[in-house]
Amino acid sequence: MDLARNWRLKNQRYRLEGTVCANCGANFFPPRQVCTECRSSNLQPHEFDGHGEVYSFTTVSQAPLGHESNLPYIVGMVKLDEGPMIEAQITDVNPGDVRIGQRVEMVTRKLREYGKEGLIVYGYKFRPIANGN
């Protein structure tokens, strides 16, 4: 992954910026160029609030190259309160304590470190909300 690509994706990774259709109101993450509901191309940037619930999850025990130091870790599908479903790592929780329907919030965390130069890439993960369902 190169620096230019990380720069282009920064709004998605740091602020959960997607799009909303100005025609029908459908929300999308990641951003889309065309609405899949009404086929309009009139989409506007939209920053999601980062709250949602765990829809599904699994514990990863065989990591892809570069993620071995995080083992084991949890990857889940998070349904945002505004509608979109996001695949993301679930952090700050033991694997046995995650459950479907659990309330979570977006946090910014280190995703990976690249190359000898040590380019650190940050992005979104989700953590359980204290006293959440």
Image (tube, rainbow, N blue to C red):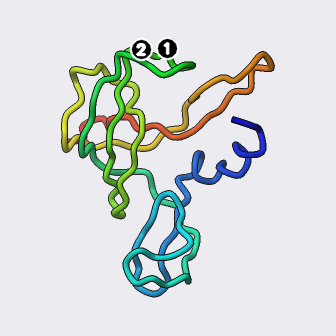
Work out which quarter of the rendered image holds the C terminus and state it: top left
Circle 2 crowding by C-alpha within 10 Å: few under 14, some 14–19, many from 20: few
Q: Gap between marks 2 and 1, in whole Å?
A: 6 Å
Q: Please name whichever residue, 128 or 113, is drawn nearer the observer in this view of the structure.
A: 113
Q: Residue at x 47, y 78 (%)?
A: 21
For the residue marked with disc 1, what is the amino acid?
A: Glu
Q: Please name whichever residue, 48 or 79, is drawn nearer the observer in this view of the structure.
A: 79
Q: Label for residue 71?
A: 2
Image-based side of 103 in relation to 17, left or right: left
Q: Position of residue 126 (x, y in %)?
A: 41, 38
> Going by the picture, which residue comes out furthest to the right?
117
In the image, is residue 123 above or below residue 20? above
Work out which quarter of the rendered image holds the N terminus and state it: top right
Q: Residue at x 57, y 75 (%)?
A: 44
Circle 1 crowding by C-alpha within 10 Å: few under 14, some 14–19, many from 20: few
Q: Secondary structure at mark 1?
A: helix
Q: Residue at x 45, y 43 (%)?
A: 106
For the residue marked with disc 2, what is the amino acid?
A: Leu
Res. 71 image quadrant: top left
Q: Position of residue 131 (x, y in %)?
A: 24, 37
Q: Position of residue 88 (x, y in %)?
A: 42, 39
Q: Please name whichever residue, 71 or 36, is drawn nearer the observer in this view of the structure.
A: 36
Q: Kindly identify which residue carries mark 1.
A: 68
Q: Label for residue 39?
A: none
Q: Position of residue 112 (x, y in %)?
A: 60, 26
Are discs 2 and 1 less than 8 Å apart at CB? yes
Q: Secondary structure at mark 2?
A: loop
Res. 83 image quadrant: bottom left
Q: Residue at x 57, y 39 (%)?
A: 123
